[in-house]
Image: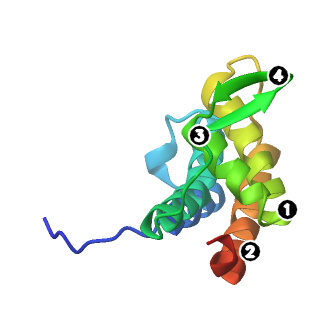
């Protein structure tokens, strides 16, 4: 194992896109339910951009917010909220894309009552690619 290895999280986005366009044509997926594939696509597409931003901010030792005060109450932020809040203060367009991807990912990962359709998967891929391109364009504005 190399200590110099650095994974590029964009691979999750690329994999999601490949999965979306090829799962119907590959025999390896014949026993997979379509919705299962769509849920995996939504989840990986979100994490592809989220982890890229998170690692970039960590690598640049950016101090993220720890707490938020709403209605007079202070609440500790989770790791995803910290990243989204930080990005929101610096790039509204990227923040909007992250929120949208996060909402879909949360449904795909946790809500069995929501049908995750081909449309959700396609939107996730498109928004993740758009967010990644925006991040690459404005990454230095985040630090």
The disc, 1 or 4, on the residue closer to the chain's N-terminal end is 4
Q: Which residue is mark 4?
A: 72
Task: Measuring from the top left, give residue 26's x and y in whole percent.
Answer: 51, 55
Relative to 105, is 15 on the left or the right? left
Q: Which residue is mark 2?
A: 134
Q: Quadrant of residue 48?
A: bottom right
Q: Secondary structure at mark 2?
A: helix
Q: Which mark is residue 92?
A: 1
The crowd level at tag 3 (other Cα within 10 Å; few <14, some 14-19, many 20+) is: few
Task: Measuring from the top left, give residue 40's x and y in whole percent.
Answer: 57, 42
Name which residue lies at 62% across and 46% down: 65
State how far apart marks 3 and 4 are (Cα): 16 Å
Q: Nearer the viewer, residue 98 or 120?
A: 98
Residue found at the very far front of the displayed protein: 72
Q: Secondary structure at mark 1?
A: helix
Q: Nearer the viewer, residue 89 or 139?
A: 89
Relative to 98, is 58 on the left or the right? left
Which label sits in the foreground, 4 or 2? 4
Q: Which residue is mark 3?
A: 66
């Amino acid at each position: 194992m190399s200590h110099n290895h650095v994974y590029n999280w964009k691979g999750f986005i690329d994999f999601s896109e490949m999965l979306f366009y090829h799962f119907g044509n590959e025999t390896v997926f014949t026993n997979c339910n379509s919705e299962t594939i769509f849920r995996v696509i939504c989840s990986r597409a979100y994490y592809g951009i989220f982890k890229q931003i998170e690692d970039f901010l960590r690598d640049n030792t950016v101090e993220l917010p720890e707490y938020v005060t709403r209605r007079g109450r202070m609440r500790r932020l989770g790791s995803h909220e910290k990243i989204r809040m930080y990005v929101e203060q610096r790039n509204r367009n990227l923040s909007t894309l992250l929120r949208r991807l996060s909402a879909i990912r949360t449904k795909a990962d946790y809500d069995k009552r929501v049908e995750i359709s081909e449309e959700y998967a396609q939107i996730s891929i498109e928004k993740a690619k758009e967010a990644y391109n925006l991040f690459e364009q404005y990454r230095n504005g985040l630090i």
